[in-house]
Amino acid sequence: MRSRRFGALLLSAAALAGSLAACGNSGPTTALQKAKDDKKLTIGVKYDQPGMGLKKPDGTVEGFDVDVATYLAGKLGVPPEGITWKEARSANRETFLQQGQVDLIVATYSITEARKPKVTFAGPFYIAHQDTLVRADDTSITSLDTLKGKRICQVSGSNSWKNIAEGTNKDNKKVDVQLVPAGAYDECITKLKGNAIDAVTTDDMILAGYAKREGSSLKVTGAPFTDEKYGVGLKKGDKETCEAVNKAITEMYSDGTIQKLFDKHFSGTGLKFTATGAPPAEGCA
């Protein structure tokens, strides 16, 4: 009887040891470790924002965010061919990180206090400013104040509309606007061109990309009213990768890459490169 019990205990101990070993081999615990071990990363970018993140007919993606992500991945040890791109819309960025569907997100992802409890942010790697895109023949919208009563595109998952309607802008000024829902910014552009809305308001880099694509039919007002700290989104708690990305961002400024990428995508749009150095990191909380 005792021998049977002893044998059962040995089997249980062996099973427990096997289970612990399996857990120990469950894979990399951080994006940095995955980059080192596998030389691969899955990175979320936008697919519908000219100049920032755009999927081309041949299936490849291009844009400022895409090039920044490629540079940062390289500094983590992942070559371009080791990157798998995944579309990250404003509404699903946090979910993708939480579920492990992506390792990093570089998708016009502004660092905000509301997002920090859910996301660990590296960066910012660039500071953009919210502005407004209107039809070229519209002279009624020239500033934040003149948006009063106008129909504004409200993109799911984006905070841009809140900066106007809730007053989270530099002047802490609430403006009474009409919000028109949309799933993505490309839908906003269609609505703007079709006179279903009066303005699209978001980061100036995003708007410059659309204005460049649409030619002379749309224009940016050139009246910014926020600072948008573009960060690299990581799974909450991934401090190791965050610190490595922050180091890479500093190098991206010191070697001149950031301005080269900016000029590549925004030359001729009127948008000016104003950074004098890497923005202070927010901290890898």
Image: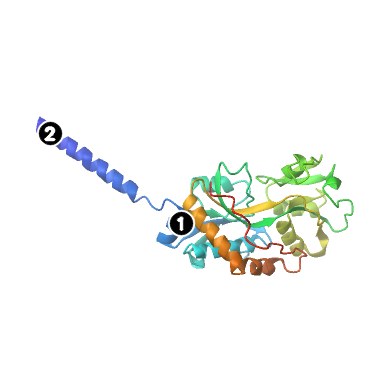
x, y (%) of residue 128? 70, 56
Q: On residue 272, which mark appears?
A: none
Q: Is residue 61 visible?
A: no
x, y (%) of residue 136? 85, 59
Residue wearing tag 1:
32
Around disc 1, counting alpha carbons within 10 Å, would you say few (fewer than 14), some (14 to 19), or many (20 or more)? many
Q: Is residue 73 visible?
A: yes
Question: Which of these two is toward me, 249 or 70?
Answer: 249
x, y (%) of residue 137? 88, 57
Q: What kind of residue is marked 2?
A: Arg
Around disc 2, counting alpha carbons within 10 Å, would you say few (fewer than 14), some (14 to 19), or many (20 or more)? few
| SS under mark 1 | helix
Residue wearing tag 2:
4
Q: Is residue 134 left or right of residue 53?
A: right
Q: What kind of residue is marked 1?
A: Leu
Q: CA distance from mark 1 to mark 2?
A: 47 Å
Residue drawn where x is 49% and y is 50% of the image? 239
Residue drawn where x is 60% and y is 53% of the image? 231
How is the rendered protein coloured?
Answer: rainbow
Quarter of the rendering containing residue 57: bottom right
Question: Which of these two is toward me, 191 or 74?
Answer: 74
Look at the picture and state if 17 lies above or below 46: above
x, y (%) of residue 266? 71, 66
Residue drawn where x is 75% and y is 54% of the image? 189
Picture quarter with the N terminus: top left
Q: Is residue 55 left or right of residue 213?
A: left
Look at the picture and state if 276 lies above or below 173: below
**Mark before the other along the chain sequence, 1 or 2:** 2
